[in-house]
Image (cartoon, helix red, strand yellow):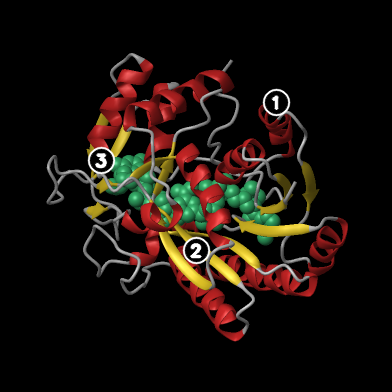
Amino acid sequence: MKKILVAGGMGYIGSHTAVELVSAGYEPIIVDNLSNSSESMLEPLEKLCGMRPKFYKADIRDRAAMDKVFAENEIDAVIHFAGLKAVAESVSMPIEYYENNINGTLVLCEAMRAAGCKKLVFSSSATVYGPTNEPPYTEDMPTSATNPYGWTKVMIEHILEDICTADPEWKVLSLRYFNPIGAHESGLIGEEPNGIPNNLFPYIARVASGKFDHLKVTGNDYPTPDGTGVRDYIHVVDLATGHIAALKRLDEQNGYDAINLGTGKGSSVFDVLHAFEKACGRELPYKIYPRRPGDLAFSFANVDKAKRLLGWTAKYDMDRMCADGWRYIEHVSK
Ligand code: NAD
Ligand code: WQD
């Protein structure tokens, strides 16, 4: 059974990917410093995986700890989710974001190289398309960012491409996630943001659970069908299965590549709100607020490359994303 190191695997996307890895016949080895997750994730993971994944509480910036992981496990490939990801926070804490995300990636790659493991799937983001490209975004478009978090993704993609150029033994895929939402259908795992959620979906979920009394719709004057922002929301389990397809692709490809993981469809804030109302069975109050600085009207993927190279397309629709997301909220609030 091939062992896959899942850096940041106790987090939202990593935990869902760990479940899909097991069902695809891989053994996940999780490394996570628990800076944005909890060791209690191991309980539901054990239930969903049918085995308790091996877990190292460690920071990918700790070279000695990472060397120990590689010494104790014959790692076939690495999936690298480990990073800080809050856009607004990155603006106020640029040093922490560059240090954690970029230095963390460099130390991880050093440990991989020392262990002779040169296959990597990296969590990139649609944010690398910046404000100048026109959606649907294609992978050949120039990348840029408007905040430190986005720049860490742009820079890490360049770093990984340069590593592959210097040493053709490396095989790296940067997966550019659009807007992952929802939860595993069991309701056992989902998104648990610390504090007040910055993102739309977890915020709506907590309006539905009564934690917040209304949704703040940030802008209804965009040049979009209903005036609110349009995004490419993708079920987190679809995203997870995209990583399984990416691992298989790594064995066929040489060098570096980047692939969008999205649905190719756009949904507005009101589309999501109304779908969530259907899932939770009640009307959800909202108020209109000013636009968030830097927000785009539209962001959605061209998904042809993922279909061509990964043989992968997203399966689940907005109703399923909301039904699964609501089931998780109901489960955790029991
Ligand atoms: P998350 O915060 O739930 O998971 C990230 C995990 O990495 C956490 O468990 C955290 O404890 C861990 N971590 C962070 N820094 C670490 C370090 N130095 N050493 C070890 N562990 C560390 O986030 P997520 O939503 O699962 O996102 C996973 C990845 O996908 C991130 O790199 C993020 O930038 C990227 N991404 C997320 C989204 C999204 O909307 N959620 C969209 C695009 C890209
Ligand atoms: C979606 C839409 C808001 C909250 C972010 C990061 C990106 C990536 C995914 C990491 C927008 C509107 C939001 C709210 C609202 N993360 N909204 N009320 O901004 O597309 O992407 O998450 O890589 O880097 O930028 O997602 O969910 O924050 O916003 O009306 O309380 O919902 O204006 O139109 P976004 P989001």
Residue 275 picture location, percent across and down: 29, 26
Q: Is residue 262 visible?
A: yes
Residue 309 sits in quarter: bottom left
Disc 2 packing (10 Å; few <14; some 14–19; many ≥20): many
Label 3 crowd bin: few (<14), some (14–19), many (20+), radius 10 Å = some
C-alpha separation, residue under disc 1 versus residue under disc 2: 30 Å
Q: Earlier in the sequence, mark 3 or mark 2?
A: 2
Q: Mark 3 sits on what residue? A: 267
Residue at 30% over, 19% down? 278
- Answer whether labels 3 and 2 touch (C-beta < 8 Å): no
Q: How crowded is mark 1: few (under 14 residues within 10 Å), some or many (20 or more)?
A: few
Is the CB–ligand 1 distance for label 1 below 8 Å? Answer: no
Residue occupying image coordinates x 70% and y 52%: 4
Which one is nearer the viewer's eye here, 288 or 51? Answer: 51
**Could you tell me the amino acid type at mark 2?**
Ser
Check the picture and name the quadrant holding the C terminus: top right
Residue 226 rendering spot, x and y as whole percentages: 14, 39
Depth check, mark 3 against mark 2: the one in front is 2
Vertical arrangement, residue 254 with respect to residue 287, above or below: below
Which residue does the numbered mark 2 point to in the structure image? 174
In front of the other: 266 or 282: 266
Q: Judging from the image, what secondary structure is the residue with disc 1 in?
A: helix
